[in-house]
Image (cartoon, rainbow, N blue to C red):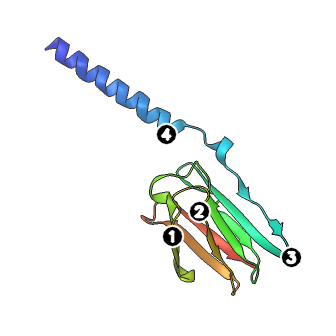
Amino acid sequence: MKNKLSLYIIGILVIIVIASHFMLRNNENNITGNTTATTSNESIQKIVIGMKNYNYYPNVIKVKSGIPVSISLDKSVDGCFRDLTIRKLGIHKYLRTSKDTIEFIPAKAGEYTFACSMGMGTGKLIVE
């Protein structure tokens, strides 16, 4: 009976240690945030989104209307967070790798919510 109880306690401790590792891991080295780049004669608003504290980071993004936007997810993003949706803009895409992008031209100023496929991670795209 004591051996069985000891095994249960050891098992629970191992699960706690493993769960703590994933919950407390620090993704700050992988987070890149907003950047703007220019290619040839056209300006493209390049957005790289990471994951921090179980949400998108940054989760508030500002872009200018009428200028092309390219959104990608860095290596810190995993699970359902790779399935990005901006419902009011009709955008839904699974970004399998950090090289995959969502590209669009925001035509109308406003605030647009983006989320993962399960609604666990959310953010706001502000078009000025």
Q: CA distance from mark 1 to mark 4?
A: 27 Å
Circles 2 and 3: CB atoms closer than 8 Å? no
Say what amino acid the circle numbered 2 marks. Answer: Asp
Give the image quarter of residue 113.
Answer: bottom right
Q: CA distance from mark 3 to mark 4?
A: 44 Å
Secondary element under disc 3, as helix, strand or loop, is loop
Q: Which residue bears the numbered disc 1?
A: 93
Q: Which of disc 4 and disc 1 is earlier in sequence? A: 4
Question: Where is residue 17 drawn, in percent x and y?
Answer: 42, 28
Q: Secondary structure at mark 2?
A: loop
Of tags 4 and 2, the one toward the viewer is 2
Q: Residue 23 bears which disc, if any?
A: 4
The residue pinned by badge 2 equals 100
* Neighbours of disc 2 within 10 Å: few (<14), some (14-19), many (20+): some
Question: Which residue is painted at 36% across and 30% down in the image?
Answer: 15
Q: Secondary structure at mark 1?
A: strand
Image point (66%, 65%), residue name: 60
